């Protein structure tokens, strides 16, 4: 009876993980590349918003900025992109929040402006949507571990009885 409860809990964990993973994969995301750039550098803002529903608006906020950048340029892998020149930006971290043409959220990302000759450019900044993938993966891993534990315990009990 106890084993059935544990297997039931494991099945619920697998089910929740299966629900979260596709939702995260379908979520619209925004990336900034590179994630670190010197003053006067260029960052590419990219979103997975559907270009067929209209332009994407990238809102850039930070130490001395609160501006919108409109994107009508199709990105190579789908979605929309825009280039942002950081001339005149104050050193610090900036947040890019995207609104898709249909009014839905396109996610957010961050980039940092460093002094000229400062830190080398890094990889693209990624939005917080990765947390959903981690949570789904953790649920799935927990379910597999629980199921394995129950099976091993059942075999051990059967061998002791025999």
Image: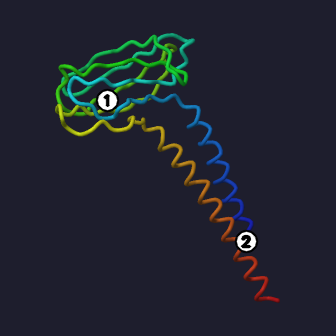
Which residue sits at x=31%, y=29%?
95
How many numbered markers are drawn? Answer: 2
| Sooner in the amino-acid sequence: mark 1 or mark 2 | 1
Q: Dividing the picture into quarters, in which one does residue 2 lie?
A: bottom right
Q: Nearer the viewer, mark 1 or mark 2?
A: 1
Q: Position of residue 114 (x, y in %)?
A: 20, 34
Q: Which residue is mark 1?
A: 95
Residue 65 as seen in the image, left or right of residue 53: left
Q: Position of residue 84 (x, y in %)?
A: 32, 19
Which residue sits at x=42%, y=36%?
126
Q: Nearer the viewer, residue 109 or 14?
A: 109
Q: Is residue 3 above or below residue 160?
A: above
Q: Position of residue 88 (x, y in %)?
A: 17, 20
Residue 54 as seen in the image, left or right of residue 21: left
Name the secondary structure under disc 1. strand
Residue 40 as seen in the image, left or right of residue 134: left
Q: Residues within 10 Å of mark 2 (few under 14, many from 20)?
A: some
| Quadrant (top left/top right/bottom left/bottom right) for the C terminus | bottom right
Task: Residue 44: give its label.
Answer: none
| Quadrant (top left/top right/bottom left/bottom right) for the N terminus | bottom right
Q: CA distance from mark 1 to mark 2?
A: 48 Å
Q: Position of residue 112 (x, y in %)?
A: 26, 34
Q: Is residue 51 above or below residue 127?
A: above
Which residue sits at x=65%, y=61%?
144
Q: Which residue is mark 2?
A: 151
């Amino acid at each position: 009876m106890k084993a059935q409860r544990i297997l039931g809990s494991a099945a619920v964990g697998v089910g929740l993980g299966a629900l979260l993973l596709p939702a995260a994969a379908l979520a619209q995301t925004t990336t900034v590349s590179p994630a670190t750039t010197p003053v006067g550098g260029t960052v590419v803002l990219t979103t997975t918003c559907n270009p067929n529903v209209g332009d994407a608006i990238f809102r850039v906020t930070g130490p001395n900025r609160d501006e919108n950048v409109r994107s009508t340029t199709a990105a190579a892998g789908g979605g929309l992109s825009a280039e942002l020149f950081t001339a005149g930006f104050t050193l610090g971290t900036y947040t890019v929040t995207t609104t898709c043409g249909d009014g839905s959220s396109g996610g957010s990302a961050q980039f940092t402006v460093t002094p000229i000759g400062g830190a080398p450019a890094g990889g693209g900044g990624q939005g917080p949507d990765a947390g959903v993938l981690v949570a789904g993966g953790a649920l799935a891993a927990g379910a597999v571990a629980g199921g394995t534990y129950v099976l091993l315990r059942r075999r051990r009990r059967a061998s002791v009885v025999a």
